[in-house]
């Protein structure tokens, strides 16, 4: 082996060690078993209310008053009818549990236990066949105030209008009174502080 | 060996080409632009900060470490590179924390303490490995390795 080869091998070995070290101290923000070693992750597993991190607080989103108002009700519109559900009415319907992650495009993800009403049941209550839904949040502005969800997500039995997170009522920062949780969507589309759901046809 | 290399290169080129096609098909033009900016940022940080910093400091290390055998010096150079990468990761977090986190669930760590601890761990492992290298090279050469120019 020549000196050049030896030096190249040593350099590559060094790069290998550096890669291992960097991976070890960051991967834990999305791979749960590595969480204790995630020294240089912006997010800590379990940090945040109800064990799940927050990106936008209720205060930042400007929804404190609307989300805590006693007059709040979720509006579901479709097929010419407008349905309205208070939080108690939603809690009174059949509840479904889903274990789903919040997966943020910033690079962290946390899996949590959610409970609420299947979105599909609320959509079906309008009697209109759907081609997806349009979801509107209470927040007065923001890029994701209004989003659309394709029929494949609406039909998924784990997609919920969630009312509980990890065994407790949703906290304000997690989207109280009700939020969307669906599998396989980026975190920004898991709309918090629901105001209205329009059934698309 | 040759066949293995050709297979590896072919697999790498194939996977890269697949990724590029996927990018072009699934992403909008403005998204591709911001991806380009992000990748350029990584190159600037590597070529503009990490590489010069480690090269310069490693030169200094080499000068100080002349008394050491090549094996020990190699271990120290590697450790220095690992430490530099860890520091590079910690710096943006420390700066962001100093500017104030968005809410309590963001930037929840004690990054300075962790960086110090990690440097200490790297130093401990390095010391051990360098010592082993030192002992081994004494054994194999039979003479003290302190024959610097």
Image: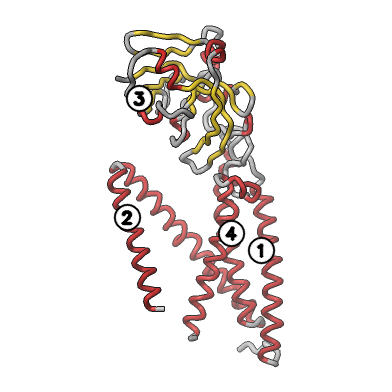
Quadrant including the C terminus of chain B: bottom right
Which chain letter goes with mark 2? Answer: B
Q: Report the residue marked by disc 2.
A: B18
State which tag comes first along the sequence, 3 or 4.
4
Q: Which mark is residue A21?
A: 4
| Residue B63 location, quadrant | bottom right
The answer for which chain carries disc 4 is: A
Query: Is disc 3 in contact with disc 4, using a CB cutoff of under 8 Å?
Result: no
Q: Secondary structure at mark 2?
A: helix
Q: Which residue lies at the image location 57% right of the left edge and 71% below the top edge?
A: B58
Q: Which numbered disc covers residue B52? A: none
Coordinates of residue A58 in the picture (x, y in percent) = 54, 23
Residue in the foreground of this view, choosing between A118 and A108: A118
| Mark 3–mark 2 distance (CA, rounded to whole Å) | 31 Å
Residue A132's label in the rendered image is 3
In the picture of the structure, the residue carrying the numbered disc 1 is: B122
Q: Chain of mark 1?
A: B
Instruction: Give the mark toward the camera: 1 or 2.
Output: 2
Colour logic = secondary structure
Of the two numbered discs 1 and 2 on the same chain, state the one appearing first in sequence: 2
């Amino acid at each position: 082996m020549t000196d050049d080869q030896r030096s190249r091998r040593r350099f590559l070995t060094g790069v290998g060690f550096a890669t291992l070290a960097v991976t070890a101290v960051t991967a834990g923000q999305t791979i749960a078993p590595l969480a204790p070693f995630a020294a240089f992750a912006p997010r800590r597993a379990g940090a945040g209310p109800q064990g799940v991190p927050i990106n936008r607080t209720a205060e930042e989103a400007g929804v404190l008053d609307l989300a805590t108002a006693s007059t709040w009700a979720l509006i579901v519109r479709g097929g010419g009818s407008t349905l309205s559900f208070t939080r108690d009415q939603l809690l009174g319907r059949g509840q479904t549990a889903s274990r789903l992650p919040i997966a943020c495009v910033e690079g962290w993800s946390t899996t949590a236990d959610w409970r609420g009403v299947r979105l599909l049941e609320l959509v079906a209550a309008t009697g209109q066949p759907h081609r997806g839904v349009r979801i509107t949040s209470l927040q007065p502005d923001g890029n994701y105030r209004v989003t659309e969800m394709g029929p494949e997500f609406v039909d998924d039995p784990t997609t919920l209008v969630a009312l509980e997170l990890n065994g407790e009522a949703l906290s304000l920062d997690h989207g109280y009174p009700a939020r969307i949780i669906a599998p396989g969507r980026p975190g920004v589309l898991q709309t918090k502080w629901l105001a209205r759901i329009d059934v698309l046809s | 060996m040759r066949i293995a290399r050709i297979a590896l290169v072919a697999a790498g080129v194939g996977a890269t080409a697949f990724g590029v096609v996927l990018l072009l098909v699934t992403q909008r033009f403005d998204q591709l632009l911001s991806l380009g900016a992000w990748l350029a940022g990584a190159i600037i940080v590597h070529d503009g900060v990490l590489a010069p910093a480690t090269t310069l400091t490693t030169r200094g290390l080499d000068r100080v470490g002349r008394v050491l055998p090549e094996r020990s010096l190699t271990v120290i150079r590697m450790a220095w590179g690992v430490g530099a990468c860890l520091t590079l990761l910690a710096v943006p977090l420390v700066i962001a924390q100093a500017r104030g986190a968005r809410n309590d669930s963001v930037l929840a760590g004690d990054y300075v303490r962790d960086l110090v601890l990690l440097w200490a761990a790297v130093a401990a492992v390095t010391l051990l490995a360098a010592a082993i290298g030192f002992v081994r090279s004494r054994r194999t050469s039979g003479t003290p390795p302190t024959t610097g120019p």
